[in-house]
Amino acid sequence: AIAGTAYLAYGVYELRHPEEQFEPDPSKKNLVILGTGWGAVSLLKKLDTENYNVIVISPRNYFLFTPLLPSCTTGTVEHRSIMEPIRSITRHKKAAVKFYEAEATKIDAERKVITIDDNSDIKGASQKTDVSYDMLVVSVGAENATFGIPGVKEHSCFLKEIGDAQQIRKKIMDCVETATFKDQSPEEVQRLLHMVVVGGGPTGVEFAGELQDFFDQDIKKWIPEISDKFRVTLIEALPNVLPMFSKQLIDYTESTFKEEKITIMTKTAVKKVTDKTVEAEATGPDGKKTMEIMPYGLLVWATGNAVRPVVKDLMSQIPAQKDSRRGLAVNEYLVVQGTKDIWATGDCAVAGYAPTAQVASQEGAFLARLFNTMAKTDAIESEIRVLSEGLNVKPGNAAEVSSSIAAHEKQLRRIKDIKPFHYTHQGSLAYIGSERAVADVSWLNGNFATGGGLTYLFWRSAYLSMCFSTRNRVLVVLDWLKSKAFGRDVSR
Ligand code: NAD
């Protein structure tokens, strides 16, 4: 039994540690992938790394399963459960992949060089360097849109990265503890317990739902004295929330929020933020505009995406990108317009689709197929070249060589016929709180719009199946069971 266990442990160890280290092969092209998000990781998963010197660069050395990020803000799911180290992804590849934890600060499209900055906290260790590429995939995503509204950057929390979710979790409990502090004034209690979410897209809606759950299911039980003072307000500039969902599901979400006592303010655009207040312009049914000033304790800003500076700079170098505003305009093969050797996927690319995880991961998988095929065609073309040269030198077995060339050419035509990228929308899902979810799903050529408790179970199983690894899946299920059995952790 001991020998068996030792053998098993050794097997697991072997699986977890690649024997081969990255060694660039001068005969292969350098394929540089910027990012470790949905686009980059789905490309890496399907890419045959033996064909290129693959180098991945990202300031984040893990993949983050973003659909469950709102659950991390309240501790329904712990953050490590939705992170997967990039090295655990690359270790399964046939040929080793190089990873640099660094931010790409400049892409020089002319010289084919990327400047990277290892933003290390270790004093004296941080450094800048250059990496050159033959082929480049830009999958760096986007940053949070603030539309230049004063005070947003300084005073609000965003919800894009793990650090954001941790900051929100701390801030919620800070507001609660400060509100219950000895001799706190009633106005201050009211302000501290007012949680404002700006942006009625899926991020804002899911977060508002999770936050109200946290309060109803846990905080209220531990600290009953604040039970009638905790308020969540969702502010949206458009006439309704979740514009990508059908009317029926929008109505269902709005009525569920009403039951949960979340206030939705639609046709209300935030214009200014200070450390304690949100100033918003509300448009009434008669078209009359009024200014509302709302004191808040926690402010979460979820108004969508903006272009990252490194992408903006790259766009400014390429004349064909002059009219593109929302990111790198790409063609039907995801090649950045105006370039031959740069591709883009996900939220930094403009391909005519919404900036979702689903689009990015399909684009990444498409690029993997494209690059695998390109490597195969290169190999066949060079074989044809060798055969043709042989034919000129030794004309003796001409018939045999010619038929071999013809066979290769036929194979080449078949492979080269790779179809342009085509997105298949599988549906939209969103959690709306109190164990209910909404789903607009395309299935068996039909569209289904459902909302409620059963949809919540569907939402849970769909997200679980989409988790990156079995390890992630196990951790998420354990987190769900743990928060159900013991309640969410209210420590800061
Ligand atoms: P979003 O772009 O979908 O929504 C942002 C909302 O903020 C908009 O409705 C906009 O009208 C509003 N807004 C902008 N400025 C405002 C202001 N000053 N005051 C008030 N409201 C303002 O953003 P998101 O929710 O972060 O989503 C980004 C992308 O990711 C979308 O494509 C979305 O579909 C996708 N996503 C999907 C899911 C899911 O399917 N469950 C979850 C998260 C994100």
Image (tube, rainbow, N blue to C red):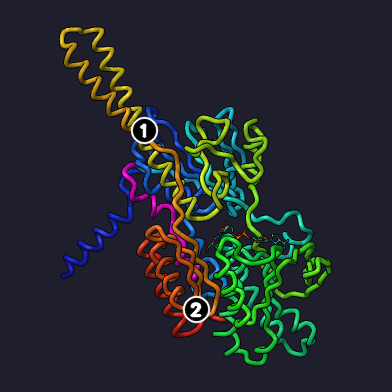
340 part of magenta stretch: no
Task: Between residue 233 and residue 427, name the one nearer to us.
Answer: 427
Quarter-wise, where is residue 233 in the image? bottom right
Determine which residue is flagged by label 1. Answer: 417
**Is 399 situated left or right of 124 in this image?**
left
Give the mark toward the camera: 2 or 1: 1
Q: Which mark is residue 435?
A: 2
Read off the magenta span. 78-95
Instruction: State which quarter of the image contains the N terminus.
Output: bottom left
Q: Residue 160 location, x and y as percent?
A: 58, 60
**Quadrant position of ligand 1:** bottom right
What residue is shown at x 58% (from left), y 63% (from top)? 163
- Does mark 1's beta carbon lie closer than 8 Å to ligand 1? no
Q: Is residue 221 left or right of residue 273?
A: left
Q: Residue furthest bottom?
A: 225
Q: Is residue 485 left or right of residue 117?
A: left
Q: Residue at x 52, y 80 (%)?
A: 488
Looking at the image, which is closer to me, 53 or 487? 487
Q: Nearer the viewer, residue 131 or 176?
A: 176
Viewport quadrant of the C terminus:
bottom right
Task: Locate residue 248, reporting x and y percent.
Answer: 55, 70
- The structure residue drawn at horizontal position 32% and vertical position 22%, both measured from the top left corner, is 382
* Residue 274 seen in render: no
Crowding at dot 2, Cα within 10 Å, few <14 / some 14-19 / many 20+, comes out as some
Q: Earlier in the sequence, mark 2 or mark 1?
A: 1
| Residue 16 figure quarter | bottom left
Per the image, is 82 magenta? yes
In the rendered image, is residue 96 in sight? yes
Q: Is residue 231 above or below residue 240?
A: below
Q: Indicate the amino acid at tag 2.
A: Glu
